[in-house]
């Protein structure tokens, strides 16, 4: 009897081992499956370039000694050039991203296998640029994780100036300098007072980054003496808060889109007084004190938006459904409740259309 029990236990352990090995093998295959981002919908091909802007008036996050704040700017634009599209992320940044997910990296997509529709180093088709969008990512997110949206805007004639705030996520500038995320910038939202203090400070810094990036991009790309002038500020999550903040403070901002980002910064008390679109994911049933405060502040800011403020809830969307992650194999994000069950092709198409409609209305877009 004892031998039979031991044999049964051994078989059960072996079966469980086989199940785990098969599951790990399946996950490895799924996460390494090549992914091509959906084609942009506009009439133009898409090019991109990047450079580093040093702000000597502010410190680099996490620097032991005083160092200039290094802002990496990713510019995406219409081009007439043709060639082979570039990678989703540089190899060094992709490896850092993978390391961040260890030991659960099999539950996240491999950014190395993703392919874009953008030609690195292409010449901007300046005559086809009819609008400028300044874009800010969410906390802890790379600019690359919004490529599906950014490429689509560029294909319709937008110059998208995407700002990588220092310390927010792994980043590599054109010189090959790799900067990891600075862990000290994160704070637990469960601790409301310190979280708001952190978020207010980040929002202010990122808004300054965005304003500087806009002015610098005009000069860098030879648009400082020719139209278009002015920009639409767009951001996701904390970047959405910064988009409203920079638009409230910079006269050349025509309007802002906050994609699922709770409001922070001075705009929560001053209002915006410019066109605004708030794109909120499905809030569900749970709403803590931070969420309740965000709803009150959104209501106030939308009421001040002029001549038009819209707060739209996207049913069945979750927080990361507005990003490229909706297209990837990311079971960990599904289990965490930040990715929903709506297919990524649907969520990306919806996000693209909503952003384009706003930019067309308050700026110019083909």
Image (cartoon, rainbow, N blue to C red):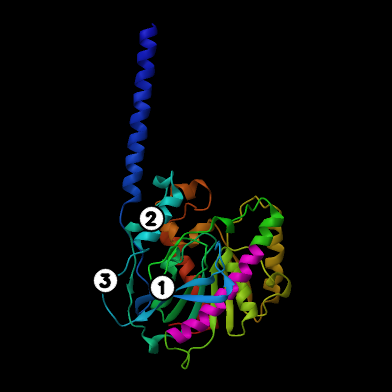
Residue 11 image point, x, y percent: 34, 20
Residue 42 image-quadrant placement = bottom left
At mark 1, the secondary structure is helix
Q: Could you tell me if residue 263 is visible in this image? A: no
In the image, residue 31 sits, relative to residue 92, either above or below, namely: above
In the image, residue 202 sits, relative to residue 208, either above or below, namely: above
- On the image, numbered disc 2 is attached to which residue? 95
User: Outermost residue, top direction?
Assistant: 1
- On the image, numbered disc 1 is attached to which residue? 152
Q: Earlier in the sequence, mark 1 or mark 2?
A: 2
Given residues 219 and 240, the one toward you in this image is 219
- On the image, numbered disc 3 is attached to which residue? 84
SS majority, magenta: helix
Q: Earlier in the sequence, mark 3 or mark 2?
A: 3
Question: Does the stretch in magenta take in 341?
Answer: no
Left-right relation of 32 to 138: left
Given residues 22 and 193, the one toward you in this image is 193
At mark 3, the secondary structure is loop
Residue 291 image point, x, y percent: 67, 57
State the CA–CA distance, disc 3 to disc 1: 17 Å
Q: Nearer the viewer, mark 1 or mark 2?
A: 2
Q: Quadrant of the C terminus?
A: bottom left
Residue 82 image point, x, y percent: 27, 78
Left-right relation of 16 to 54: left
What residue span does the magenta drawing correspond to? 199-220
């Amino acid at each position: 009897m004892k031998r039979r029990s031991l044999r049964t236990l051994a078989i059960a352990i072996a079966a469980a081992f086989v199940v785990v090995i098969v599951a790990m093998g399946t996950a490895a295959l799924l996460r390494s499956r090549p992914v091509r981002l959906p084609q942009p919908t506009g009439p133009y091909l898409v090019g991109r370039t990047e450079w580093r802007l040093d702000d000597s008036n502010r410190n680099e996050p996490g620097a032991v000694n005083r160092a200039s704040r290094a802002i990496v700017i990713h510019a995406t634009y219409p081009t007439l050039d043709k060639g082979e599209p570039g990678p989703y992320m540089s190899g060094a940044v992709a490896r850092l991203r993978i390391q961040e997910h260890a030991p659960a990296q099999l539950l996240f997509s491999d950014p190395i296998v993703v392919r874009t529709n953008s030609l690195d180093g292409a010449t901007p088709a300046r005559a086809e640029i009819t609008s400028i969008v300044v874009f800010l990512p969410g906390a802890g997110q790379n600019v690359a994780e919004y490529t599906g949206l950014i490429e689509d805007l560029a294909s319709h004639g937008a110059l998208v100036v995407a700002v990588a705030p220092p310390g927010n996520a792994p980043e590599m500038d054109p010189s090959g300098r790799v900067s990891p995320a600075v862990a000290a910038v994160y704070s637990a939202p469960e601790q409301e007072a310190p979280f708001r203090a952190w978020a207010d400070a980040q929002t202010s810094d990122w808004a300054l980054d965005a304003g500087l990036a806009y002015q610098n991009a005009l000069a860098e790309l030879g648009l400082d003496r020719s139209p278009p002038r002015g920009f639409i500020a767009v951001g996701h999550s904390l970047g959405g808060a910064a988009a409203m903040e920079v638009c409230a403070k910079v006269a050349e901002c025509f309007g802002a889109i906050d994609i699922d980002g709770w409001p922070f910064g001075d705009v929560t008390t001053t209002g915006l007084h410019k066109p605004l679109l708030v794109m909120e994911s499905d809030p569900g049933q749970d709403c803590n004190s931070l969420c309740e405060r965000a709803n009150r502040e959104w209501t106030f800011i939308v009421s001040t938006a002029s001549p038009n403020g819209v707060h739209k809830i996207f049913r069945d969307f979750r927080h990361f459904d507005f990003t490229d992650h909706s297209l990837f194999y990311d079971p960990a994000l599904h289990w965490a409740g930040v990715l929903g069950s709506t297919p990524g092709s649907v969520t990306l198409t919806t996000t693209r259309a909503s952003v384009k409609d706003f930019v067309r209305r308050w700026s110019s877009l083909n």
